Amino acid sequence: MAKHGWRIDRAFHNYIYFSFYYPYVRSVYHLFRLLARYLRWFQPLKFVIRTSFDRYHAKIISLSDIQKILTLNEDIDIASEQNKQIVPFAYAYRILFEEADFIAVMDCPCKLTLNAPAWTINSCISVGRKTSTFWLDHCGEKYHARKISPEEALGLIRKFRQNGYLTQAFFKVATGGCTGIICNCHPDTCVSLQATRFARRFDPALSMNANSGYSIEYHAEKCRHCGACARICHFKAIQVKDLSWIYERKICMGCGLCTEHCPEQALLLYRDTEKTHPLDLDLIKSERLAMEKQGSANGI
């Protein structure tokens, strides 16, 4: 109720969502599978799916941007419409990090649903006291929730990224319309990424996952055409054929895994102004400060 105010329906949904995290996500996953398999012909479902995606979605984030979140020494709370440049969905775009050093981790319902390897299960991260405290109080025994330090959280994320897992920040109307939940995701064991795949059977433009806002800069003089970048790319944005390096910028989600797995450091991330804005807290704070100064200059 402290998070949702008079929206008792959302508060109740929030409680049910996290208290029964695994069966909730498992049920949604199997529902999407059934819809994608048997009801692709039913056109009104496009509207239903699009509406759902506007209320539950994710933003892929780079390692450098997650480092800024986990080392945050102030509270961030921005609910501006301009956030849609970062999180391009109709609802659930509030950027909120309160007491970012209060962090909890618990079992991931996606990985439980999709029978992921045991070592990957304990991987959902909550950044901020309110949600983390709820996890610790209500999910400790069921989903092995435990408090960890920012350093432990960053170490966990690095371990997953070394094993080919990308990082996503989740935004949900049910949990306050804001970020704060960060997970380590692989297309084989992520319901969010698989939901996008299912939804595109109805409409190729649908996506539950916003790109990071970055693209790849290629340095041909360093490249040995080993193919490591192509093998780690989950979105098939890179191909290495003989001595050719082929890159599809438009389908690249900017997760940064290829840059981290390139043994020759031939790839770098750069901010792509034709994509969504990154979830870069330095950039967000500087843009907000510029807007405040502009507002003061205009007498607002």
Image (cartoon, rainbow, N blue to C red):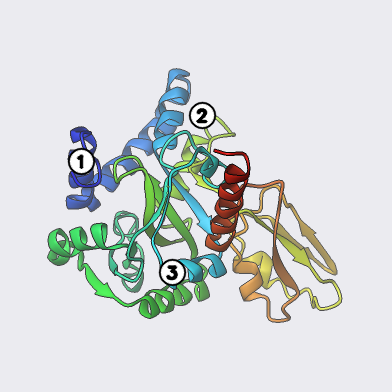
The residue type indicated by label 1 comes to Ala
Compared to residue 142, the image places residue 299 above or below, namely above
Q: Position of residue 134 (x, y in %)?
A: 19, 58
Q: Is residue 230 left or right of residue 19?
A: right
Is the N terminus in the top left, top right, bottom left or bottom right quadrant?
top left
Q: Are marks 3 and 2 in contact (CB under 8 Å)?
A: no
For the residue labelled by badge 2, is the local secondary structure a helix, a strand or a loop?
A: loop
The residue type indicated by label 2 comes to Phe
| Residue denoted by label 3 | 72
Query: Dot 1, how many residues are within 10 Å of its Cα: few (below 14), some (14-19), or many (20+)?
Result: some
Visible in this render: residue 269? Answer: yes
For the residue labelled by badge 1, is the local secondary structure a helix, a strand or a loop?
A: helix
Q: Is residue 241 left or right of residue 149?
A: right
The residue type indicated by label 3 comes to Leu
Query: Which circle marks residue 11 in the picture?
Result: 1
Alpha carbons under labels 1 and 3: distance apart: 27 Å
Along the line of sight, the residue nearer the viewer: 222 or 292: 292
| Residue denoted by label 2 | 202
Along the line of sight, the residue nearer the viewer: 94 or 174: 94
For the residue labelled by badge 3, is the local secondary structure a helix, a strand or a loop?
A: loop
Query: Which circle marks residue 52 in the picture?
Result: none
The residue sitting at 43% across, 43% down in the picture is: 79
The residue sitting at 22% across, 71% down in the picture is: 146
